[in-house]
Amino acid sequence: MPKSTPKTLIAGNWKMNGRRENLSEIKSVSEGVQATKQGPEVLVCPPAHLLGLAIDAEKDSQLHFGAQDCHAEEDGAYTGDISAEMLADLGAKYVILGHSERRQGHNETDSQVRAKVKAAVRAGLIPIICVGETAGEQTRGRTVARISRQLNGSLPEVLGEARFVIAYEPIWAIGTGLVPTPKQIADVHAMIRGRLSDRFGTNGETTQILYGGSVKPGNAAELLAIENVNGALVGGASLKATDFLGIIQSQVSEVA
Ligand code: PGA
């Protein structure tokens, strides 16, 4: 059964995949979601060149759209970058920030992620802030330390009533087919929930905490039933409508 508070969020992160012809996958997801009642909130984060096209094509659908990164400034001489305000102007609702592929591949630091989170909130976007440990940290029992540091460094001091989402993505589980045990996930999510409640009160208690890393149609029901798992951030399995719908449908209580 899907949990009612906070509402389950199933988010697809296409990463650097997709061409205009792949917009048909989004259309199929939209049709599948349309055919369900009382389903989760569904978000698709295509690459930047498809974002505006997808939003325009699906403006009457129940899908939400988001970007995979943004710059901290509103405008300026930042060749190749895109601001949160520009994404909001396109009609995006969410932005993924601090994904491990950006932290590792672009050397993004916690303080840069924090500046981007502030930018997202400033522009009225909902940031999805990613945290997660490496395989080495996991083996050495450093998971909690790493995630605490990322939460402290990547979240602004004050967020007021602004909605934000946390995604716990163990780096070793991304794209590998490996998944932590339900107990490992439950422990990390409970720890994150505790930190959020301490820092942000009621807002922290109702913040969605997503799990990400090798979520597939076959394991989604089990993963999403874990305490304090309020949704999933899905990479590979979000590229094909049939797979993504399989995950979404694991959270649907009734078909229309
Ligand atoms: P994956 O990626 O589902 O392909 O493991 C998850 C992510 O990186 O968000």
Image (tube, rainbow, N blue to C red):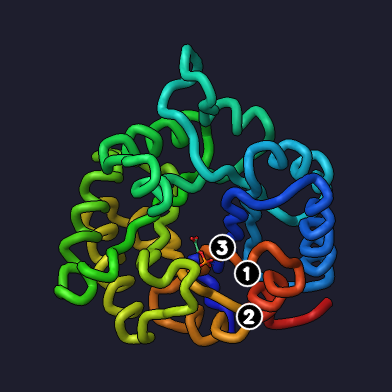
Per the model, the C-alpha gap separating discs 3 and 2 is 12 Å
Please state which of residues 33 and 100 is positioned toward the viewer in this rendering: 100
Task: In the rendered structure, find residue 237 and report the number of the disc placed on it.
Answer: 1
Q: Residues within 10 Å of mark 3 (few under 14, many from 20)?
A: many
Residue 161 image label: none
**The C terminus is located in which quarter?**
bottom right
Residue 36 image-quadrant placement: bottom right
- Asked whether the residues under the numbered discs 3 and 1 touch, taking CB atoms below 8 Å apart as contact, a structural biologist would say yes
Is the CB–ligand 1 distance for label 1 below 8 Å?
Answer: yes
Q: Are marks 2 and 1 in contact (CB under 8 Å)?
A: yes
What amino acid is at disc 3? Gly
Give percent across and percent down for residue 147: 24, 60
Q: CA distance from mark 3 to mark 1?
A: 6 Å
What residue appears at the point 72 percent right and 41 percent down from the top-left corner? Answer: 50
Q: Report helix, strand or loop for mark 2.
A: loop
Q: Confirm if mark 3 falls within 8 A of ligand 1.
A: yes
- Please name the residue that numbered disc 2 is placed on: 217
Q: Is residue 67 visible?
A: yes
Give the amino acid at mark 1.
Answer: Ala
- Crowdedness of circle 2 by 10 Å Cα count: few (<14), some, many (20+)? some
Which residue has dot 3 on it?
Answer: 235
Three-letter code for the amino acid on which mark 2 is drawn = Pro
Comparing 54 with 41, the one in front is: 54
Residue appearing at x 16%, y 63% in the figure = 145
